[in-house]
Image (spheres, rainbow, N blue to C red):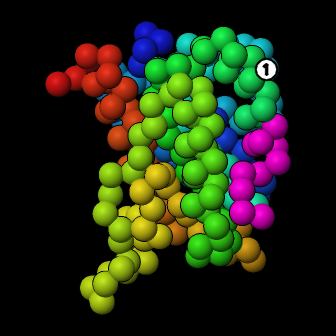
Amino acid sequence: MSENRIVAIVYYSGYGHTARLAEAVWSGANAQEGVEARLYDVTVLGEEDWTELDAAAAIVFGTPTYMGSAAAKYKAFMEESSKRWFARLWRDKLAAGFTCSASQAGDKQNTLAQLVTFACQHGMIWVGLDLLAGNNSSHGSPDDLNRLGASLGVMAQANADEGAAAMRTSDLETARHLGVRVATQTLRLHGLQG
């Protein structure tokens, strides 16, 4: 697979919820012919993984929102990327992001803004969520895609007293949609799709 067709999904998951979102993004990206998506857990990144991230066409960032920002273990990954930042190795790659918290709001916008800033510091091109807000009228439903009304990326909510298996399908499908979008834009950026 050509490097300009690889979508890397780099995530941290404290309790399994963000991992499920990462898998949904992976599923959406892999559904696009001509793209290969790969999952990377930041807690087990080796030098070969970093080299693969450097070669990927797109990197999708995923972290839970803890205390209004990215998880500490994800922040460590962000800081560890500083050698790449200095060498401009991720410049002009596509970037996107997703996050999850137990609260409906949970200050998840702050986490996505943090990821956007991080990507822009690297000189990356941010791909936002192209869905209208769901669940925002009398005809809306928590089963709508983008039910929390994000535009920077995917926001998901998972009850603090329930495991990852109880996540809403609508949140997972929104993450899958983001994977499709990033894969499609990857192909377009490299002139592989009209």
Q: Indicate yes or no whether the magenta region holds residue 193.
A: no
Element under label 1?
loop
User: Residue at the bottom extreme?
Assistant: 138
Compared across the picture, whether 63 is left or right of 135 comes to right
What residue is at 66 percent from the left and 32 percent from the top?
A: 40
Whether residue 94 is situated above or below residue 112 in the rendered picture: above
Q: Looking at the image, which residue is at 58% across and 52% down?
A: 112
Name the amino acid, label 1.
Answer: Gly
Q: In the image, is residue 61 above or below residue 49? A: below
- The residue that disc 1 covers is 46
Whether residue 48 is visible: yes
Magenta stretch encompasses residue 75 = yes
> Which contiguous range is marked in magenta?
67-76
Image point 33% across, 52% down: which residue?
Answer: 130
Residue 12 coordinates in the image, percent (x, y): 72, 45
Q: In terms of image quadrants, where is residue 194?
A: top left
Q: Quadrant of the N terminus?
A: top left
